[in-house]
Image (cartoon, grey):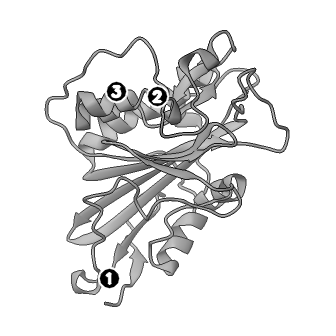
Protein backbone atom coordinates (compact mmCIF):
# COMPACT_ATOMS: atom_id res chain seq x y z
CA UNK A 1 0.00 0.00 0.00
CA UNK A 2 1.38 3.43 -0.93
CA UNK A 3 2.58 5.70 1.84
CA UNK A 4 2.96 9.48 1.66
CA UNK A 5 3.74 12.12 4.26
CA UNK A 6 3.70 15.84 4.93
CA UNK A 7 4.70 18.09 7.80
CA UNK A 8 1.66 18.54 10.02
CA UNK A 9 2.39 22.27 10.48
CA UNK A 10 1.27 22.45 14.11
CA UNK A 11 4.38 21.41 15.96
CA UNK A 12 5.99 24.76 16.89
CA UNK A 13 9.37 23.75 15.56
CA UNK A 14 9.25 20.06 16.42
CA UNK A 15 9.61 17.38 13.77
CA UNK A 16 6.22 15.83 13.21
CA UNK A 17 5.37 14.02 10.01
CA UNK A 18 1.99 12.54 9.27
CA UNK A 19 0.48 10.32 6.64
CA UNK A 20 -1.67 11.94 3.97
CA UNK A 21 -4.95 10.16 4.46
CA UNK A 22 -5.70 7.27 6.77
CA UNK A 23 -6.24 4.82 3.92
CA UNK A 24 -2.78 5.45 2.46
CA UNK A 25 -0.76 4.35 5.49
CA UNK A 26 -0.19 0.93 6.99
CA UNK A 27 0.36 1.65 10.69
CA UNK A 28 3.47 -0.27 11.69
CA UNK A 29 2.75 -3.06 14.17
CA UNK A 30 5.33 -2.95 16.95
CA UNK A 31 3.13 -4.64 19.54
CA UNK A 32 5.64 -7.44 20.05
CA UNK A 33 8.92 -5.48 19.86
CA UNK A 34 10.68 -2.72 21.75
CA UNK A 35 12.67 -1.08 18.94
CA UNK A 36 10.77 1.45 16.83
CA UNK A 37 11.79 1.43 13.19
CA UNK A 38 13.55 -1.91 13.60
CA UNK A 39 16.51 -3.02 15.68
CA UNK A 40 19.45 -0.70 14.91
CA UNK A 41 21.78 -2.21 12.31
CA UNK A 42 25.53 -2.13 12.71
CA UNK A 43 27.23 -0.51 9.70
CA UNK A 44 30.70 0.01 11.11
CA UNK A 45 30.30 -0.82 14.80
CA UNK A 46 31.17 -4.51 14.41
CA UNK A 47 29.09 -7.56 15.16
CA UNK A 48 26.53 -7.17 17.93
CA UNK A 49 24.73 -9.78 20.00
CA UNK A 50 20.98 -9.12 20.30
CA UNK A 51 19.75 -9.72 23.84
CA UNK A 52 15.97 -9.80 24.32
CA UNK A 53 14.62 -8.99 27.76
CA UNK A 54 11.11 -8.62 29.19
CA UNK A 55 10.97 -4.83 28.83
CA UNK A 56 13.80 -3.90 26.49
CA UNK A 57 16.27 -5.09 23.83
CA UNK A 58 20.03 -4.62 23.73
CA UNK A 59 22.62 -4.76 20.96
CA UNK A 60 25.76 -5.85 22.83
CA UNK A 61 29.40 -5.49 21.78
CA UNK A 62 31.62 -8.24 23.15
CA UNK A 63 34.78 -6.39 22.08
CA UNK A 64 33.87 -3.15 23.85
CA UNK A 65 32.09 -4.95 26.74
CA UNK A 66 29.27 -2.41 26.41
CA UNK A 67 25.77 -2.36 25.00
CA UNK A 68 25.93 -0.19 21.88
CA UNK A 69 22.19 0.36 21.94
CA UNK A 70 19.22 -0.33 24.18
CA UNK A 71 15.62 0.12 23.03
CA UNK A 72 12.33 0.24 24.93
CA UNK A 73 8.89 1.82 24.76
CA UNK A 74 7.06 3.81 27.39
CA UNK A 75 3.27 4.16 27.47
CA UNK A 76 0.82 5.57 29.98
CA UNK A 77 0.56 4.04 33.44
CA UNK A 78 -2.24 5.09 35.80
CA UNK A 79 -0.78 4.01 39.16
CA UNK A 80 2.93 3.32 38.83
CA UNK A 81 4.20 0.62 41.15
CA UNK A 82 7.89 0.44 41.98
CA UNK A 83 10.07 -2.20 43.58
CA UNK A 84 13.29 -2.09 45.56
CA UNK A 85 16.52 -1.90 43.64
CA UNK A 86 18.81 -4.92 44.05
CA UNK A 87 22.04 -4.27 45.92
CA UNK A 88 24.24 -5.62 43.13
CA UNK A 89 24.25 -5.84 39.35
CA UNK A 90 24.34 -9.28 37.75
CA UNK A 91 26.59 -10.93 35.18
CA UNK A 92 24.73 -11.65 31.95
CA UNK A 93 25.79 -15.19 31.14
CA UNK A 94 24.45 -14.83 27.61
CA UNK A 95 27.55 -12.72 26.88
CA UNK A 96 31.10 -13.90 26.40
CA UNK A 97 32.48 -10.82 28.17
CA UNK A 98 30.62 -11.67 31.41
CA UNK A 99 31.24 -8.23 32.90
CA UNK A 100 30.58 -8.24 36.64
CA UNK A 101 29.47 -5.73 39.27
CA UNK A 102 33.00 -5.68 40.71
CA UNK A 103 34.56 -4.76 37.35
CA UNK A 104 33.41 -1.17 38.00
CA UNK A 105 34.28 -1.00 41.70
CA UNK A 106 36.70 1.87 42.55
CA UNK A 107 36.95 2.72 38.85
CA UNK A 108 35.69 6.30 39.18
CA UNK A 109 32.67 5.45 37.02
CA UNK A 110 29.07 4.68 37.89
CA UNK A 111 27.20 1.70 36.50
CA UNK A 112 25.05 3.62 34.04
CA UNK A 113 21.76 2.05 32.97
CA UNK A 114 20.87 2.29 29.30
CA UNK A 115 17.33 0.88 29.60
CA UNK A 116 16.32 2.63 32.85
CA UNK A 117 15.21 0.99 36.05
CA UNK A 118 12.18 3.23 36.77
CA UNK A 119 10.58 3.25 33.31
CA UNK A 120 10.90 -0.51 32.87
CA UNK A 121 9.75 -1.24 36.44
CA UNK A 122 6.59 0.87 36.22
CA UNK A 123 5.60 -0.46 32.78
CA UNK A 124 6.67 -4.10 32.85
CA UNK A 125 6.96 -5.15 36.51
CA UNK A 126 9.50 -6.46 38.96
CA UNK A 127 10.98 -9.27 36.85
CA UNK A 128 11.58 -6.84 33.98
CA UNK A 129 13.06 -4.28 36.39
CA UNK A 130 15.58 -6.82 37.70
CA UNK A 131 16.74 -7.45 34.15
CA UNK A 132 17.79 -3.80 33.86
CA UNK A 133 20.47 -4.64 36.44
CA UNK A 134 22.17 -7.09 34.07
CA UNK A 135 25.65 -5.79 33.25
CA UNK A 136 24.84 -6.15 29.54
CA UNK A 137 22.63 -3.07 30.03
CA UNK A 138 25.35 -1.02 31.71
CA UNK A 139 28.02 1.43 30.52
CA UNK A 140 30.65 3.33 32.52
CA UNK A 141 29.22 6.78 33.23
CA UNK A 142 30.53 9.66 35.26
CA UNK A 143 28.14 10.21 38.16
CA UNK A 144 27.67 13.85 37.18
CA UNK A 145 26.03 12.64 33.96
CA UNK A 146 24.42 9.48 35.32
CA UNK A 147 22.71 11.38 38.13
CA UNK A 148 22.31 14.61 36.16
CA UNK A 149 20.97 15.31 32.67
CA UNK A 150 20.89 11.62 31.68
CA UNK A 151 18.66 10.76 34.63
CA UNK A 152 16.61 13.93 34.16
CA UNK A 153 15.78 12.92 30.60
CA UNK A 154 14.99 9.33 31.60
CA UNK A 155 12.54 10.55 34.23
CA UNK A 156 10.96 13.14 31.93
CA UNK A 157 10.26 10.33 29.46
CA UNK A 158 8.89 7.99 32.14
CA UNK A 159 6.90 10.45 34.25
CA UNK A 160 5.80 13.08 31.73
CA UNK A 161 6.02 12.14 28.05
CA UNK A 162 5.18 8.48 28.61
CA UNK A 163 1.93 9.50 30.32
CA UNK A 164 1.03 12.55 28.25
CA UNK A 165 1.77 11.16 24.78
CA UNK A 166 0.25 8.12 23.17
CA UNK A 167 3.44 6.05 22.91
CA UNK A 168 7.08 7.03 23.39
CA UNK A 169 9.94 4.91 22.04
CA UNK A 170 13.55 5.28 23.14
CA UNK A 171 16.88 4.13 21.69
CA UNK A 172 20.00 5.04 23.64
CA UNK A 173 23.61 4.06 24.05
CA UNK A 174 27.27 5.10 24.12
CA UNK A 175 29.50 6.86 21.62
CA UNK A 176 33.20 6.00 21.30
CA UNK A 177 36.02 7.83 19.56
CA UNK A 178 39.38 6.53 18.30
CA UNK A 179 41.17 7.31 21.58
CA UNK A 180 40.40 4.04 23.34
CA UNK A 181 40.35 4.12 27.13
CA UNK A 182 39.34 1.23 29.33
CA UNK A 183 38.66 0.35 32.92
CA UNK A 184 41.22 -1.98 34.48
CA UNK A 185 38.70 -4.78 33.84
CA UNK A 186 38.87 -4.14 30.08
CA UNK A 187 35.49 -2.39 29.76
CA UNK A 188 35.81 0.44 27.23
CA UNK A 189 34.89 3.90 28.49
CA UNK A 190 32.46 5.86 26.28
CA UNK A 191 33.23 9.43 25.25
CA UNK A 192 29.56 10.47 25.01
CA UNK A 193 26.04 9.07 25.06
CA UNK A 194 23.07 9.49 22.75
CA UNK A 195 19.33 9.22 23.20
CA UNK A 196 16.70 9.13 20.43
CA UNK A 197 13.06 9.61 21.47
CA UNK A 198 10.15 8.96 19.12
CA UNK A 199 6.59 10.12 19.82
CA UNK A 200 4.21 7.89 17.88
CA UNK A 201 0.53 8.80 17.79
CA UNK A 202 -2.60 8.22 15.79
CA UNK A 203 -4.96 11.19 16.07
CA UNK A 204 -7.06 11.35 12.86
CA UNK A 205 -3.79 10.68 11.05
CA UNK A 206 -0.55 8.92 11.87
CA UNK A 207 2.18 11.19 13.29
CA UNK A 208 5.78 10.83 14.35
CA UNK A 209 7.84 13.27 16.42
CA UNK A 210 11.57 12.77 16.93
CA UNK A 211 14.05 14.22 19.42
CA UNK A 212 17.74 13.30 19.47
CA UNK A 213 20.46 14.23 21.97
CA UNK A 214 24.17 13.71 22.49
CA UNK A 215 25.54 14.13 26.01
CA UNK A 216 29.33 14.55 26.29
CA UNK A 217 30.85 12.47 29.04
CA UNK A 218 33.09 15.26 30.21
CA UNK A 219 31.58 18.71 30.59
CA UNK A 220 33.69 21.78 31.34
CA UNK A 221 32.08 24.47 33.45
CA UNK A 222 28.47 24.58 34.67
CA UNK A 223 26.22 21.89 33.24
CA UNK A 224 23.20 23.37 31.41
CA UNK A 225 19.75 22.19 32.38
CA UNK A 226 18.00 19.75 30.08
CA UNK A 227 15.86 22.56 28.66
CA UNK A 228 19.07 24.33 27.58
CA UNK A 229 20.69 21.27 26.04
CA UNK A 230 20.55 21.57 22.25
CA UNK A 231 19.01 18.64 20.32
CA UNK A 232 20.96 17.05 17.48
CA UNK A 233 19.98 14.94 14.47
CA UNK A 234 19.66 11.18 14.13
CA UNK A 235 22.02 11.46 11.15
CA UNK A 236 24.69 12.92 13.43
CA UNK A 237 24.28 10.07 15.91
CA UNK A 238 24.48 7.51 13.09
CA UNK A 239 27.74 9.08 11.88
CA UNK A 240 29.27 8.94 15.36
CA UNK A 241 28.08 5.41 16.26
CA UNK A 242 28.20 3.45 12.99
CA UNK A 243 24.59 2.37 13.60
CA UNK A 244 21.58 2.65 11.30
CA UNK A 245 18.41 3.66 13.15
CA UNK A 246 14.76 3.64 12.02
CA UNK A 247 15.70 1.72 8.86
CA UNK A 248 12.33 -0.05 8.60
CA UNK A 249 10.52 3.23 7.99
CA UNK A 250 9.79 4.20 4.38
CA UNK A 251 12.96 5.76 2.94
CA UNK A 252 11.44 9.18 2.33
CA UNK A 253 10.20 9.47 5.88
CA UNK A 254 13.39 8.06 7.41
CA UNK A 255 15.59 10.48 5.47
CA UNK A 256 13.50 13.50 6.45
CA UNK A 257 13.21 12.85 10.17
CA UNK A 258 16.83 11.75 10.56
CA UNK A 259 18.18 14.91 8.92
CA UNK A 260 16.01 17.37 10.89
CA UNK A 261 16.87 18.86 14.25
CA UNK A 262 14.06 19.71 16.67
CA UNK A 263 13.89 23.41 17.52
CA UNK A 264 13.15 22.76 21.18
CA UNK A 265 12.35 20.05 23.68
CA UNK A 266 8.74 18.87 23.70
In this rendering, would 231 be left or right of 154?
Answer: right
Could you say whether the residue bearing mark 2 is in a helix, strand or loop? helix
The residue that appears at 25% across and 45% down in the rendered structure is 75
Residue 130: mark in rendering? 3
Residue pointed to by mark 1: 20
Disc on the earlier residue, 3 or 2: 3
Residue pointed to by mark 2: 152
In this rendering, would 66 be left or right of 90?
Answer: right
The residue that appears at 47% across and 62% down in the rendered structure is 15
**Residue 20 higher or lower than 84, as above or below:** below
Could you say whether the residue bearing mark 3 is in a helix, strand or loop? helix
Tell me the quarter of the image containing the N terminus. bottom left
Residue 255 lies, in percent from the top left, at 56, 73
Q: Quadrant of residue 125?
A: top left
Residue toward you, 138 or 18: 138
Q: Please, which residue is most extreme toward the left here?
A: 78
Disc on the earlier residue, 1 or 2: 1
Amino acid sequence: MARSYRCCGCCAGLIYWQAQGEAEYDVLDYSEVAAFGGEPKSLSAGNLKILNNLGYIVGYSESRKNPLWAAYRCGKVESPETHDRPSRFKVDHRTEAKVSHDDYTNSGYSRGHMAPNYAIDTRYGNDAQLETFLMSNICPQKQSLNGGRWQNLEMKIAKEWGNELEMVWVICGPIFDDDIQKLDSGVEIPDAFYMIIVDERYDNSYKLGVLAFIFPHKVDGPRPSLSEHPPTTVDNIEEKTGLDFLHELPDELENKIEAKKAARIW
